[in-house]
Structures are given as C-alpha cells and as structure tokens.
Image (cartoon, grey):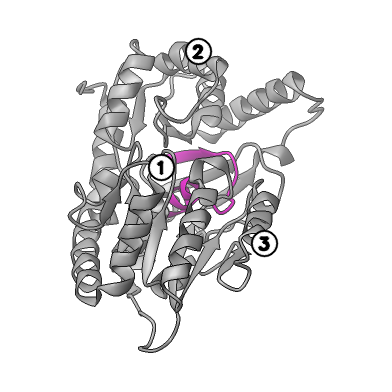
Amino acid sequence: MKIILLVSSMGSGGAERVAATLANAWSERGDDVTLVATFSKRGPCFYPLSDKVCFIHLADLVRGQGHGPLQYIARIKTLRSLIRDAGADVIISFLTNVNIMAIVASLGLKLPVIACEHNNPSADGRSMLWSLLCRFVYPKASLLTVLTDNIAASFKEMVPAAKHIAVVPNPLPNELLSQSYSPAEPGSRKRIVAVGRLNSQKQFDVLINAFSTLADRIEDVDLWIWGEGGERAALEAQVVRLGMTRRIFLPGNTPTPWSEMARARAFAVSSRFEGLPMALMESMALGVPCVSFDCPSGPRELTRDGRDGLLVPPGDADALIEALSRLLMDDALCEELGRRAAISVRERYGLHAVLPKWDLIFAQVGTGTLVSR
C-alpha cells in the first residue's frame, strides 16, 4: 500500500512523534510511505525515521510562493500535484491546518483522505475561522480520526455533517518498550520532570508556582521542564523572581526525552487541555509515577480514572502540590503506581494494539464499507 502522511513539521512535538512512529512501522512492514512536512523549511527530523521512509519538505517544491494567502494557495497547488503524481492509495493528515490543506488539495482526485485531529475543539480555543473551516471542509474527508471518545462527541457537535468519525489512539514507539524506569539512588536529589512546548496550553507557570511552594517543604527535590516555546523568557523570569534558579531548570529540547523521564521521581502534567498527551503516555510506559490535572482530555483516559496515576482538579495548584508531595514521600505508592501504569499503557497503546485499528480503517476507506460510530 502507498501511503502519503502529511504533517506541519517534524519538530519535537507529540504529533510529530506519532507521525514518525506510524511512518516507521508501516514502512518496516513493507508499505510505501512518503512523509511530507507541509509548512516547515528544510531541516533535520527531530525523531528518527527509517531509511525506507521518503521524507519531503513541501517548501522545497513550491515555486513563486508569494506571501500570506498567495503562499498558502501555492502550497495547496504543489501538494495537489505531489498527490496526483504519487499514485498513493490513501492520504493521512495530522492537525487542523494540515487537514484542511490536504482535503482541499485532494478534491476531485477520488483518493481517500483521513484527517487526524489531536486536540479537543471544545477546549483548545481554536478561532471561529478554523471552526468554520472544519465544519464545512471536514465532511469532504473520507474519515476523521480523534484520540478519545469524548473528543469524538465534541467533533460530532462541531462537524455534524462529518461522514465518519473513528477513535484511534496514539501509539507507543517499539523502541520505548526496551526502556525502563531508573529512579534516583537513595540519598540523591529527586526530580520532578515535565515535558512539552513552553506555551499557554501547558501552564508551566502554574507548575513552577506550585513547585516553589513545595520546595519550601521538601529540600531534596528539583523541577526539570524539558521543551522550547514562546513563553521561555516569561518562565525564566518567573523562576528568577521566585528565587528558584538552583531548583528549577528549563534546559530546552533533548534528543533523549525517555532517559530524562526515566530519571524522574514523578512526572507532572499541568495542561489546560490535551488530546492524548504522548509525554504522559511515554512516562507511564516507563513506569514513572505521574500526577496530572484532570484536564480535557487524555489524562483521565490514560490513567484509567486515576487508577494508574494521580489526577487532581484542573488548575488546582494546592491539589497539585499535595499530590506531588505524596509521590515524593511515599515509596510504596510510587512503586505501585509505576508498575500498574507501565503494564496498562503498554498493553493498550503499543503498536500491536494500535496498528490493527489503522488496518481496519484502511480496509474500510478502500472498500467503501465504512461503519459509522
């Protein structure tokens, strides 16, 4: 099967991790996979790609791009030519802006288009323009995938004319399953770790404030926040203002996030909203005890209503402090949560569990026997 997989870029985000995982898995089993970065300029792929995957930057193919709307139109025309000439069996696109481009570029080509959403439209604050585009363009896709059942419900409200919506979770990379949790040696400093883009969605300012209170109670713990983004300067200034420069660290992106997660005493998620957060899923798969805001959506699904990790009310900094304190002070709780999380997440989200869901979708869009949820 020939697959064209479209993403905005291949940077360090969760959607990019999923794109690399799926592209590698499909190509290694014999599918012909072309991965196209539709908006970024030429640069390295943050996550390893198999040599069998054809990786293309659309910007390299666009001529006379212009600016603003003209550039967008030029990209759509170029993408349409690429799709038409590739002889693909299916187009898969990730995230809203790429989904819209893929659907428009494929109009009239009689080729199945699967648009994949990774956030919850009821919580992610998307603009009226993007909501309207989704409402009127998404029904032209063969199928829309979302990450959880509650996200499916939100999209059914936003896109009532959507033909078919399927729930397909993110997969864990096989490479992760060979990793293991390596807690700090007795007597060494403990780490709370968080991973994500430094933006308002992740609410790292809330986590930093919470940790500064926690640090007054517990001396032998530090906070490490891995990632980059537009709020770096503001977060760094916050750390300085709180006098936490020796306890809170923002070292940027890392090529080895699993190693950093595996060193954590606890993994923390302070987001306003999520889809199905890859960093949380990966840390749980490593056996790291986790605490998360019960935000829409993802943490509740991953932790099975809090059985495999600690959930606290969204935005409740006091509850976050207390949950982190429990993990720092209770060795038995950490061991039990980590053990349950690793077993549960690996079983539900390993490639062995997720790829068959994709195979069913491929068969359905190819034969026209879709079954609505």
- For residue 218, which quarter of the picture? bottom left
Residue 315: image tag: 1
Mark 2: few/some/many CA within 10 Å (<14, 14-19, 20+): few
- Which one is earlier in the sequence, the residue at label 2 or at label 1? 2
Residue to which mark 2 is pinned: 132
- Which one is earlier in the sequence, the residue at label 2 or at label 3? 2
Q: Residue at x 30, y 35 (%)?
A: 362
Residue to which mark 3 is pinned: 240
User: Is 29 in the magenta?
Assistant: no
Mark 3: few/some/many CA within 10 Å (<14, 14-19, 20+): few
Q: Residue at x 59, y 62 (%)?
A: 253
Tell me the amino acid under the disc marked 3: Val
In terms of secondary structure, where does tag 1 sit?
loop
Please name whichever residue, 217 or 154, is drawn nearer the observer in this view of the structure.
217
Which image quarter is the N terminus in? top left
In x, y percent, where is residue 97? 56, 28
